[in-house]
Amino acid sequence: MRDYVNSRVGLYRTADLYAGDVDLKLNIEAIDQPDASWDLIICSHVLEHVDHRKALRELHRILAPGGKLLALFPIVDAWSRDYEAPEIQGPRDRSLHFGKSNHRRRFGASVRGEFADAGFRLETFSPIGPDVVRFGLIPGETLFIGNKA
């Protein structure tokens, strides 16, 4: 992904709290970056692992006016609300309830409102057929595009 994005933007930096092969060590729930410092943020399959409400507020804070957040995460659109159960802690139970041992929830349709609560104007993109392959997405996956005014 780095080569693909680098060839299309002026400055591209990767970030993670734990991975060793990134440019910046950042906690998405308390991002050590100045306000309005980034034009575009790609957040791929991270929000299901963290306090997504804090993360969305932080991502909105560091986006410049007119900036965009591209977010991907597993979602069950048929569910009206997110499924969270803090009492579920063990890896086996988290896998059973949330799909993977390190997930904290399964998102439902209510996550759209949480983008708005963080200050984003939300658009979505759900490709079909060859566009799934073209954009390197999982079939049925929705790209959430958070716009900052």
Image (cartoon, helix red, strand yellow):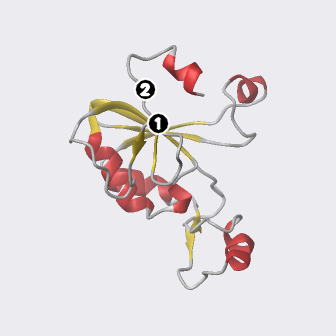
Q: Tell whether label 2 touches label 1 (CB within 8 Å).
A: yes
Q: Residue type at mark 1?
A: Thr
Question: Is residue 2 depicted above or below 78 in this figure?
Answer: above
Judged from this view, the residue extending furthest toward the front is 20
Regarding residue 149, the answer to whether it shows in the image is: no
Regarding residue 60, the answer to whether it shows in the image is: yes
Locate residue 98 relative to residue 47 in the image: left or right. right
Residue drawn 35% across the image and 46% down it: 59
| Pick the front one: 91 or 18 | 18
Judged from this view, the residue extending furthest toward the top is 7
Residue 12 disc label: 2
Residue at disc 2, secondary structure: loop
Question: Is residue 91 depicted above or below 137 in this figure?
Answer: below
Give residue 84's position: percent from left, percent from top.
55, 74
Quarter of the image with the N terminus in it: top right
Give residue 146's position: percent from left, percent from top.
41, 40
